[in-house]
Structures are given as C-alpha cells and as structure tokens.
C-alpha cells in the first residue's frame, strides 16, 4: 500500500506547519500594516511602489516649502509697499506745499518757511527709503532692484525721454548692449538685437498726440513704451545697456527649473531716484516747477506700487496652485503607500482564522502518530 504508519517523518504535521508558518507571516504583515497605517513599510513590500512614493514625498515636501516661500515673499512685498505708501503720503504733502508756494498770496519769506517743511519731508523720504527692510535686507533703496537700463546718451533710469522712448520695461532681459534698427521711415517696424538674438516687431502707427504705444520684444525680454515725441526712424542705431542688478528670486516650485522660479524687482524710492533731490520752494518759479517734478515722482511710486500689487496677486494664485498640486500629489502617494484598512482588516481576519485552524490541525497531525502505539499493545 502507498500509505502506511511511519513515525520518522510526520508528513501531515510538516504540511500543517508549512501552511501555519505562511498564515502566521500573513497575519504579522497585516498587524504591521494596521499598526503603522502603511501598506509599504520596507522595500520588500513593494520595491517599485516604495521608489515612486519616496520621489512623491520629496516632491510634496518641496511644494510645501515653495508654498511657504511664496507666503513669505508676499510679506516682503507688503513691507515694501508699506514703505512706498508712506513715501506716497509724503509726496502728496510736498505737492500741496508746492501748490501753496506757487501762489503770490505768499511772499518769498513765507516760501522760505514752507520750504523748511518741504526739505524735512524730502529727508524723511530718504530715511524711509534706507530703513525699510525685511530680514535685514533693504527693499526700497535700490539694493533690491533688478536689471536696469542705461541709454548711452542719458543717465541710468527706468524712465526715459530720449527720442520718444518714455519707458523701457525689462521682463527677463539679460545684461548687455542692445541695438535698435528703425531705418525705413513709416514702415512701422522696429528691430532689436542683443548681438545674439534679433527680433522685429510691427506696430500699427506711431503714437498720436497725447498717446503711447508699447512695442514688446518678447524674445529678448524688453518692452518699449513710445510717446508722441517718437517718429518713424528716430531710433535707428540707438543703443542702450542692460546693467545687472540683484533683484529678488523666489523659488515657487519644487524643481530646479526656470519655470519654478520667479524674479522681481523693487525700485529705488530715494529722493535722488525720484528726481526731487534738487526741488525747492524758495521762489515762485521753483515752486511751480516743483509741482511737475513731484507729479512725476508720484507717478513713479504709483507704477512701483502697481507692479508690487500685481506681483502679490500673482503669488496668491501661485499659492493656490501649489495647494492644489500638493493635495493631488499627496492623494496619489497615499494610494501607493497607505494601508487600505477595509481590505487589510479582511486579510487580518482571514489570516487570524487560518493561524488558529492551522495550530489546531498541527496538533491533530501530531496526534495521528500516537495511534501507532495501539499496534504495540
């Protein structure tokens, strides 16, 4: 017969032990997963899943830090705008004094008295400009300014009046020399080159009286604002320099890539930069001239505050996007790595029953060998 009573090897007990060990291992795995809340506790649980989830975790932590960076940058911008707001208030009062001094209802002696306050207000603008800071970094004294423009025949400035160029706005332009081509009269085409990249832009018409047009060289990161002093051909051969500045960089993403960073600039709010350093109310002519000078300064501060406000709004949308990305990536990582408690509880119950029944069957298998003693009776 194929089967008999043998006592050296209890095959039934060995089989029961093998299955019991497997059930015990499954039970221990379920206990570990239910205790930790993780489906993957070590590489052997899911090698590929562990690698994917670890990369996701690094990405999530990076996104969370980028979110904090963006929030802190908003705080920085609000600090700078707070300083500019006070400069704005001071300029408004200075303009009021200039208007007062521009009337013959006051004498030159009165103007001297008015000029004392005017001078003190200007000094306060310089003090605010030099003392407004965030984390020991000055913000509105020019040290946080990005790349600036200098015409070869004008002083370094972001506001230009040469040949009808009212303003040059830099939107990522590299440092270097830029040359304009505007050779053919009335052709409506302007060309700009940095020596490596050349771009031509067509505009409809030269600015009419009291109007401006913007010519955007997007490939070069330069935008020209032309006023009604410009005529076709005026800018042919003109050059300007883009001078390096420190500016600000914000890491708004988790990766080392250009589209994961944001650069911005905060202008200089000192009296010299606002061109009011030499303004005076000492006589009627100077007072009248000061009105226009201060109006220009107010417009500069308005533009700067507008730029900061736009940047703050952009950062708020950035934060919203980072929140959404973090949430979705966290959900994906959770799907890979976290325990499904419903499924794992079912597996735990199954393994628990199999361990109990396996233990009982191992006892029975061991007891079967005892029956051979009846043959010796």
Image (cartoon, helix red, strand yellow):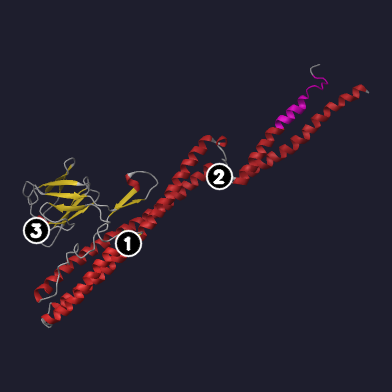
Q: Which residue is mark 1?
A: 133
Q: Residue 351, percent across and down?
A: 68, 39
Q: From the image, which quarter does the C terminus lie in?
A: top right
Answer left or right for 329 relative to 340. left
Q: Residues within 10 Å of mark 1 (few under 14, many from 20)?
A: some
Q: Residues within 10 Å of mark 2 (few under 14, many from 20)?
A: some
Q: Is residue 30 above or below residue 85?
A: above
- The residue at the point 50 percent across, 44 percent down is 333
Q: Is residue 353 above or below residue 231?
A: above
Dividing the picture into quadrants, the one containing residue 289 is bottom left
Q: Which mark is residue 69?
A: none
Q: Is residue 81 above or below residue 250?
A: below
- The residue at the point 57 percent across, 36 percent down is 45
Q: Which residue is mark 3?
A: 229
Q: CA distance from mark 3 to mark 1?
A: 39 Å
Q: Which numbered mark, 1 or 2, is in the foreground of this view?
A: 1
Which of the two labelled residues, at mark 2 and mark 3, occupies the earlier sequence position?
A: 3
Residue 8 is one of the magenta-drawn residues: yes
Q: Which residue is mark 2?
A: 338
User: Residues in magenta?
Assistant: 3-19
Residue 139 is one of the magenta-drawn residues: no
Badge 1 marks a residue whose secondary structure is strand
Q: Residue 362, percent across and down?
A: 77, 32
């Amino acid at each position: 017969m194929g089967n008999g009573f043998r006592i050296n090897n209890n095959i039934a007990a060995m089989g029961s032990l093998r299955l019991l060990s497997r059930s015990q291992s499954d039970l221990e795995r379920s206990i570990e997963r239910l205790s930790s809340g993780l489906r993957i506790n070590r590489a052997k649980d899911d090698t590929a899943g562990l690698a994917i989830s670890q990369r996701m975790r690094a990405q999530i932590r990076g996104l969370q830090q980028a979110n904090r960076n963006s929030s802190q940058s908003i705080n920085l911008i609000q600090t700078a705008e707070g300083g500019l707001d006070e400069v704005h208030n001071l300029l408004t009062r200075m303009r009021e004094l200039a208007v007062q001094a521009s009337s013959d209802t006051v004498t030159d002696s009165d103007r001297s008295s008015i000029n004392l306050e005017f001078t003190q207000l200007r000094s306060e603008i310089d003090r605010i400009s030099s003392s407004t800071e965030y984390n020991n970094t000055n913000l509105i004294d020019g040290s946080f300014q990005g790349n600036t423009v200098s015409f070869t025949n004008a002083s370094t400035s972001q506001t230009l009046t040469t040949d009808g160029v009212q303003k040059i706005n830099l939107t990522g332009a590299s440092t270097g020399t830029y040359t304009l081509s505007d050779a053919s009269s009335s052709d409506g085409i302007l060309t700009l080159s940095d020596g490596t990249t050349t771009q031509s832009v067509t505009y409809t018409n030269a600015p009419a009286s009291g109007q401006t047009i913007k010519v955007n060289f997007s490939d070069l990161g330069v935008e020209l604002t032309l006023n009604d002093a410009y005529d076709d051909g005026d800018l042919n051969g003109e050059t300007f320099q883009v001078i390096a500045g420190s500016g600000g960089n914000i890491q708004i993403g988790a990766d080392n890539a250009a589209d994961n960073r944001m650069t911005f600039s905060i202008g200089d709010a000192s009296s010299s930069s606002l061109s009011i350093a030499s303004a005076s109310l000492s006589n009627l002519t100077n007072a009248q001239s000061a009105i226009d000078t201060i109006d220009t300064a107010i417009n500069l501060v308005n533009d700067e505050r507008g730029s900061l406000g736009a940047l703050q709004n952009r950062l708020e949308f950035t934060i919203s996007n980072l929140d959404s990305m973090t949430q979705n990536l966290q959900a994906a990582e959770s799907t890979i790595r976290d325990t499904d408690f419903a499924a794992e509880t079912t597996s735990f119950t199954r393994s628990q029953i199999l361990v109990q029944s396996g233990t009982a069957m191992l006892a029975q298998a061991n007891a079967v060998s005892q029956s051979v003693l009846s043959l010796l009776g």
